[in-house]
Amino acid sequence: MEANEAQELQEHAEHGAHEASLRPVAFSMSVLAVLVAVVTLLGHRTHTEAIIAQTRAAVEQNRASDMWSFYQAKNIRNTSSELTGDLLSVVQVADKKTAETLRSGLEKKQKKWEKDLEETQKQAREIEEKVKEQQEEVTLAEKRANWLDLAEALLEIGLVVTSVTLLTRRRIYWYVGLAASMCGIVSTILAFLIK
């Protein structure tokens, strides 16, 4: 064996040993790529949940507004009939019997309308409570989405910094990348611990 061939074999052995020492880096990059994909998917789904909850809250808010408008219309009708009844009791009319029949009919309707007012008000308040619950749901989903966005960014940073190890062959980048990735994993866990 010539000296030249021996030197080539030695370089090839060193290169193979160096490549073997980078296998954990390559493996960790593969794992980080999968984690980035999973966290990205979770983040997108959480954003979608927030939008859906926000839409539901807006629909319920419109229902509450409609219910309060309905309440107001009933209240105006009730007040108007009350004023008409009061007017019929104090004004001199030619046909007192008809006026008294109208006034007593209005009083009966007013009693029914007052119950309707209470029921309408109760329904409007129930819808408003539902809106509050849905707005809390929106807030929670947005907080989770923010934590997942942070996790995605940290995992991507970790993946990129880790990949620099393959170019420079310096393990410090691998450690820094793993540290950033761990922060991303913690952020992911925090996203699901938020209540």
Image (cartoon, grey):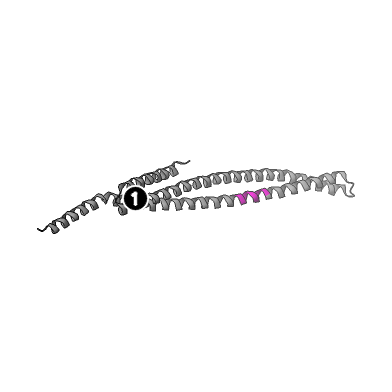
Q: Is residue 129 magenta?
A: no
The kind of secondary structure element at disc 1 is helix
Residue 80 drawn at (x, y percent): 78, 48
At a point 13% along the width and 56% down the height, the residue shown is: 6
Q: Is residue 97 rendered to the left or right of residue 144?
A: right
Q: Which residues are magenta?
A: 61-68
Image position of 171 (left or right of 134): left
Front residue of 32/133: it is 32
Three-letter code, disc 1: Thr
Magenta includes 67? yes
Name the chief secondary structure element in magenta. helix
For residue 23, say whether it is visible.
yes
Q: Residue at x 45, y 48 (%)?
A: 150
For this orientation, the residue located farthest to the left is 1
Q: Residue furthest front?
A: 3
Total number of numbered discs in the rendering: 1
